[in-house]
Image (spheres, grey):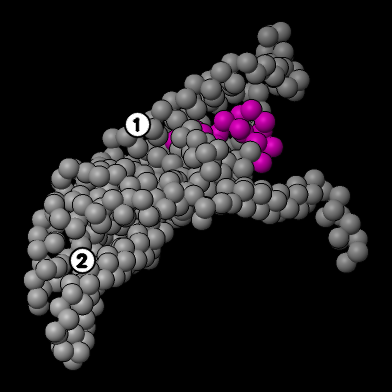
Amino acid sequence: MGNALKAFLQKTPTKIGIATAIMFQLIFSIVWMTGYDGVSDNTSHLKIAIVNEDAGLGKQIAEQIGSGLPFQVSIEASVDEARQKLNDRDVQMVMHIPVDFSKRLQTPGQKSELQYWVNESNPAMIKSVMSGVAANVTAAVNKQAVAAGAQAVLTQMNVPAAQAQSTAEALSEKVTANVQSTNPVTGMNNQMVPMMLVLASFVGSMIMGMNLQQASVMIGPKVGRWHKFAARGILNVAAAVVTALVGSSFVMLLGGQSAHGFMALWGFETLCLLAFMFFSQLFLLLLGNAGMLLNIIMLSAQLVSSGAMVPRELLSDFYYDLGRFLPATYAVEGNMNLLFGGPGMGGAAAGLVTVMLCSIAVGLLITALRKEKAPAASAVASVSPKLAN
């Protein structure tokens, strides 16, 4: 047993494997702990749009909400404009105070309603936070309405105590909440699909790139560097199409949502994989198998900065800006639009194409700058007799 252990430890792959396991722990711990640090303190980055159509108490309520909530609050002119911003993810919730809000408050036996819209085509945390905000705002407005009603009742000094009590009870719920969801997501399994697709796609691209790099080394100088680069590109395209077909098919077969249909999902996943493959290939072209370390860093950074688990608005400025240059950000955005609904895939697709083309361009530059090794001596020797004849 001791000799076997010693033999294993003398081999380079064993040392690399142990170092990789350690680096995974270090990298994920550092990136995730710093990336999610202060997330709960960044709720002020979230945005709520208020549409007030009530000229009475509604105006006062809108002003109080705007100054009292720890979010960015904007006043919109119409519900349609606010909901368009919600669909575009420019705001995280829309609150509507209807035109008859004050009138219904003053009418015995009637209740006023505050309307809320939350876009579920977002990280799950958005729905949780905004649902809590809606409940708290409704409770605060309800308390204000009760106070106003109680003040009106107390001015009537001749009202019997029993009648005053019943009136106060009637006023205790003068305002109710009507929370509606746009682009609803059915089940936690569907909510996690964007993150799953990004994780599976990038890890698969990393491992495929590593194996192609090893194959390239095994082939040696008998095939030129440009032919190798072209062959890698062809393999990337073929593998992306087939892999995306398998992944999209299983998502649909297992009950996944798709607001735009299977073909759109397949095509977009193919584009995601191509961007991931050419992006992860860069570090392998530059550093060989040692480039896997940078790919591990990129994996961890993308899981944090892409918005798959935590809204990007809650991240620090560093990770928010970093996400603009990484393909996973556009993959998550596009997948949410495809699966759950949203403003469309144009922006996300353009981002992925930009990353892919830049990766190909840098890969070509690395290949051009790398010196090509001379053919092996054995190969030259085998050709010499033929030339002599």
Q: Amino acid at mark 2?
A: Asn
Up-down: is 356 above or below 380? below
Q: Which mark is residue 178?
A: 2
User: In this image, 9 relative to 187: left or right?
Assistant: right
Q: Is residue 276 magenta?
A: yes
Prevalent SS, magenta region: helix
Residue 19 in the image: state x and y as whole percent: 75, 49
Residue 144 in the image: state x and y as whole percent: 27, 67
Task: Between residue 162 and residue 325, name the one nearer to us.
Answer: 162
From mark 1 to mark 2, how far is it between C-alphas?
Answer: 37 Å
Q: Residue at x 40, y 40 (%)?
A: 330
Task: Find numbered disc 2 in the image and state the secondary structure of the residue it sits on.
Answer: strand
Going by the picture, which residue comes out furthest to the right? 2
Up-down: is 317 above or below 287? below
Label 1: how many Cα within 10 Å (few below 14, some 14–19, many 20+): few
| Residue numbers of the magenta segment | 275-293
Residue 131 in the image: state x and y as whole percent: 33, 64
